[in-house]
Amino acid sequence: MENGNETTGLHFILLGLFNHTRTHLFFFTMVLMIFITSLMGNALMIALIYVEPRLHTPMYFLLSQLSLMDMMLVSTIIPKMATNYMTDTRAISPTGCGAQIFLFLTLGGGECFLLAAMSYDRYVAICHPLRYAILMNQRLCLLMTVGSWLLGGVDGLLQAVATLSFSYCRSREINHFFCEAPSLVRLACADTTIFEFFMYVCCILMLLIPLSLILTSYGLILVAVLRMRSTEARKKAFTTCSSHLAVVGLYYGTIMFIYMRPKSYHSVDRDKVVSALYTILTPVLNPLIYSVRNREVKG
């Protein structure tokens, strides 16, 4: 079977992020600690927003959805990576690989649009405070949230189906710690030019459109803040927005580094490290950023 023309029905091999050395064992332990901290931090954030009446606002409703996406994102990747490392069996089935691609892109794309919705919420709160309750009503919040999940789901489904439709007749070893579409496509024995163009267009739609909305919202916010006469009001606005911008910068910066660069500039080892930043580190930083720099959450 190894020497057959096609290996579509066979398992793929994830080479992983760590080797079985003392140094890598230390880093692996750190990743597990970060994973547990991420789950606990995001779960506590969701529970706090649910039980505290003062946090029943559009901003915190959107934040609870961000925490839910982060919990699902790390749960999609880390448990499988940890199981493979501890049992020294690095195989993953095509179905499992497709599920990882679908869930990862669904959650990643959903977060892009959710961050755009959160930036619009801040724009309305700062630039139109008297009309906030009307402009950011419950119906609109639900529509933005459902829209984020649906758009991410459509992107994930299309790319997962397209990726697994190729024949993989070369090495089945994926030099990554989870199934990511660009890493898997490198193994295909068919011409993937059309798919890569399609994937690039998806990245433009899923990354640049929400990013444009975010930059527009914060550009308008900056103009409004600079016009404020009250130093206290200006400081509060900057504190609130800086937390969101920190999340946006870290998340978009790493994802665009992976998906928006020309193919010739890709380095497998460097891509794995950058992927670890937005799949492992970002989900644990989000609740910390929003709690440490947010007066209501600290209260």
Image: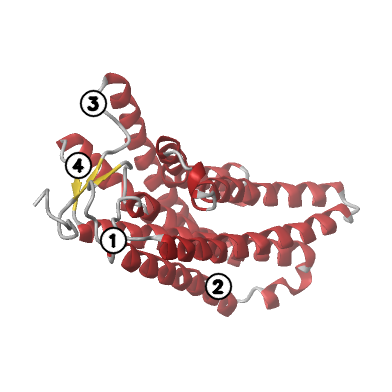
What's under tag 3, amino acid-wise?
A: His
Please rate how many residues cluster around mark 1, counting C-alpha atoms within 10 Å: few if below 14, some from 14 to 19, many from 20.
some
Name the colouring of the figure: secondary structure
- Mark 1 or mark 4: name the one nearer the start of the chain: 4
Classify mark 4: helix, strand or loop.
Answer: loop
Asked whether the viewer can see residue 65, the reply is no
What's under tag 2, amino acid-wise?
A: Met
Q: Are marks 4 and 2 in contact (CB under 8 Å)?
A: no
**Image vertical order of residue 277 relative to residue 61, above or below:** above
**Image vertical order of residue 146 relative to residue 94, above or below:** below
Please give the residue where the numbered disc 1 appears in the rendered image: 99
Image location of residue 34, percent across then percent down: 39, 37
Q: Is residue 145 left or right of residue 181?
A: right
Please give the residue where the numbered disc 4 appears in the rendered image: 90
- Mark 1 or mark 3: name the one nearer the start of the chain: 3
Real-space Cα distance between discs 1 and 4?
Answer: 16 Å
Classify mark 3: helix, strand or loop.
Answer: loop
Image location of residue 81, percent across then percent down: 27, 43
Please give the residue where the numbered disc 2 appears in the rendered image: 144
Residue at screen point 72% across, 67% down: 124
Real-space Cα distance between discs 3 and 4?
Answer: 13 Å
Residue at screen point 59% across, 77% down: 140
Please rate how many residues cluster around mark 4, counting C-alpha atoms within 10 Å: few if below 14, some from 14 to 19, many from 20.
many
